[in-house]
Amino acid sequence: MRAGSWKTLRERCARRVSEIEHGVGIPDPWSADEFIDRLERLRGREIDLCAVSWVSGESTGAWRRYADHDVIAYAANTSSIHQDLIILHEVGHLVLDHQGQCVLSVEDAQRLAPDLAPAAFAHLLDRVHGATEEHEAEMIATMILARIAAQRRRTRPVGARADLADRIETTFG
Ligand SMILES: [Zn+2]
């Protein structure tokens, strides 16, 4: 991806995340369920959040758009930060009015795994083959995570352990 288009993508995503922040806010303390409830009210469309039991070799997250509602499936048997990443990635597709569907592959999930150095995100995203929509969805997810981390820092004592979201905030905040 050219530097120019990356900048455009990032700006478009930042605008949409700001709209979400002002429109529904980021739940504090963070709750994916609460966030989805708020998005439903904002969009006037139901979102079914389905926890599925993840089996090695299968996709860990998926989104499908229907005429009157959306379905987001995510792996139940993985860490909460990983679940948040999956759900927020799919939310990214929703709030950008993408058409169609997304299936996060195992490869994607590994790429998004908590042990990944956040500094590598942009580099990796740039190398990913596939649609701009996937780049955008991942950008939305990381930007919302950055806001969750920033919010947590404001409301929690200094010295709380740095987690993935905190480190992502440093990169994308
Ligand atoms: Zn996707």
Image (cartoon, rainbow, N blue to C red):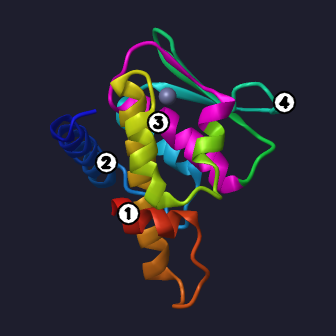
Give whichever of 19, 77 is nearer the camera.
77
Q: Judging from the image, what secondary structure is the residue with disc 4 in?
A: loop
Tell me if mark 2 has few (under 14), some (14-19) or many (20+) residues whose alpha carbon lies within 10 angstroms of its own.
Answer: many
Residue 136 on image: x %, y %: 36, 35
Give the residue type that dot 4 points to: Val
Question: Which is closer to the viewer, label 2 or label 4?
Answer: 4
The numbered mark, 2 or 4, whose residue comes first in the sequence reads 2
Q: How many marks?
A: 4
Q: Are marks 2 and 1 in contact (CB under 8 Å)?
A: no
Q: Secondary structure at mark 3?
A: helix
The residue at the point 35 percent across, 59 percent down is 172
Q: Which residue is mark 3?
A: 91
Is the C-beta separation of discs 4 and 1 under 8 Å?
no
Q: CA distance from mark 2 to mark 1?
A: 16 Å
**Disc 3 versus disc 1: distance between alpha carbons?**
20 Å
* Residue 59 found in image quarter: top right
Task: Name the amino acid, label 1.
Answer: Thr
Q: Earlier in the sequence, mark 4 or mark 1?
A: 4
Q: Which residue is mark 1?
A: 171
Query: Mark 4 to mark 1: distance in Å?
Result: 31 Å
Q: Are marks 2 and 4 in contact (CB under 8 Å)?
A: no
Q: Nearer the viewer, residue 120 or 49?
A: 120
Q: Measuring from the top left, give residue 110's x and y in whole percent.
A: 66, 42
Q: Secondary structure at mark 2?
A: helix
Label 4–label 3 contact, CB within 8 A: no
Q: Return the disc, 3 or 1, that comes first in the chain's sequence.
A: 3
Residue 130 visible (yes or no) = yes
Q: Nearer the viewer, mark 4 or mark 3?
A: 4
Q: Secondary structure at mark 1?
A: helix
Q: Which residues are magenta?
A: 80-108
